[in-house]
Image (spheres, helix red, strand yellow):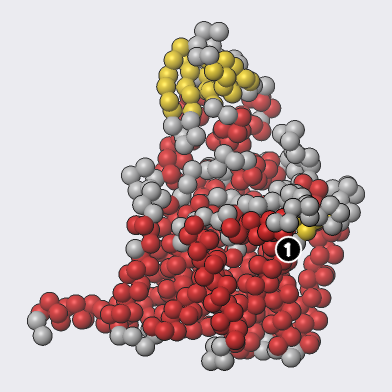
Amino acid sequence: MHVKEKIMKCSIDYFYEKVFKNEFYSIFLIVMISVLYRILTATCISSGGDAFYKWFQVKRWLYGFSFDGWAPLYGTWNHHTARWAITFPTFIFQYVFGTNPIVYYLVVIFFITGATIYLYKIALNIFGLYFAFSTSLLFIFFPVMGTVGSQLLPSVFSCFYMLASFYFIIILLDKKDSRYVLFSAIMLFFAYSAKITNLFFIPGYIYILYKTKNFKNIKLFFGILFALFLLENILFYIYSDGNLLFGKIECIFNGHLGGNDISFKDKYSILYFFSRWINLPISWFLLFVISIPISIYIIFRRETTKKIKYVVFIYLSFIFFETFAVKSIFPLKIAEPFRSRYLSITIPFMLLIINYVIISYIKHLRKKSALFYIFLIFFIPFMFNGSIFIRNNNVISTYAYYKKINKYFFEGYKIFFLSKNELYRFVYVFMDDKYIFEKKYVKNYIPILKTFDDKEFYCISKCNIKNNNVIIISNNYEINKFKSYNK
């Protein structure tokens, strides 16, 4: 054997032994890859509204203000502020690390990495280290997770809480300790508090707990959920001054559930139920299409371990109720609008199901072949080469934009934005807190609509400084041009 071949063999053996036979090295590598990749693929802070609105409302809470709407669009309590499983952890991060926009990313990366760790632990318990490592990598590199994993939206928190809850259920199957029922129920309630549709997983939980034949655990599980639900409703009723009799559910139903009507006059209207899946991004749609027949295959395959079957039942439970849930019968109305990010929680379960079948067939291959599969997974990001930001990294750009735009604002520049949401993003996320929360500054600026170069822009500037310089901000923190404005 040549020297090069010996070195290659030793390298492969060393990597294989460290990563696929040592849990510490394996999970450490996954955490490092997750954090680094989330930073490299982070998108700009969304100007869509939901994410930066939550961030701002938590800042108001931090500065001692109530959860009122501030903007006329929202009332005191709504489907954003009522999601305490998102707002409370965000408050802790803001309290400890401050309100710099970089902390926005810190919150999200912490929770998406935590979700990855729980996914790793679930996969490890089901089918070993190699399955855990490869499934976690697939989750990290899956194309849509670049956007999902960098915005302060329910998807990230749902993944964390739901995977934590399911992990404790999987552990319960081995250790028969009722404490894991308690942990699982609490995490499931947190998941519900982050996104109400996570309740669609409950039928899957009922099936799993029923199969354990321990009815004491079933009573304990749902007793905890009911007790937490009552406690939440009481607290909402108290803190809303009696305005919310049914707590968070009332907020969600009043402000968020609103899918389109279905008319039976059209013979094809029943297909509208499936539109949310058909309209997924292509990579996600393919994953969904592949996962359904594989799920059926796993259910009826005798040699399949029970734990992966439980993954299938949990997954199919959500799929079924997410597809067919309605808000009203007359008229027939879909419960939830069609937005792909609402379905992000299905991704880890899809990956567990599909990767289980793949690993089942390649687990007996030689080390080189096993490593080749890992190499193919690492190749996924290069198939979507527009999503990795190294030179113009968005996390770094966010910090630079924060410093620069506040400098211009302090100097009295008139800052023009292309849309109202761009202006709100500046005020809610990037404007120095003192201009928002300190009385002596609040009246010194005003956002207004102005005409410039025969176009309408949303403008903000300090009223007490005369400065005719203008900057125009585009979507991705870019300063388009400087001009003089004399009107």
Residue 435 picture quarter: top right
Residue 11 picture quarter: bottom left
Q: Is residue 79 visible?
A: no
> Image point 53% across, 23% down: which residue?
416
Q: Which residue is mark 1?
A: 324
Which three-letter amino acid code belongs to the residue tagged 1?
Phe
The image shows residue 60 at horizontal and vertical percentages of: 68, 41
> Foreground: 120 or 409?
120
The image shows residue 80 at horizontal and vertical percentages of: 70, 48
> Foreground: 158 or 190?
158
> Foreground: 181 or 388?
388
Please tell me whether residue 465 is drawn above or below residue 204 in the rendered image.
above
> Image point 45% across, 67% down: which residue?
138
User: On the picture, is 134 further left or further right than 327?
Assistant: left
Quadrant of the image for the C terminus? top right
> Image point 59% across, 50% down: which residue?
152
Please tell me whether residue 359 is drawn above or below residue 483 in the rendered image.
below
Quadrant of the image for the N terminus? bottom left
> Foreground: 336 or 53?
336
For mark 1, give the secondary structure: helix
The image shows residue 347 at horizontal and vertical percentages of: 55, 65
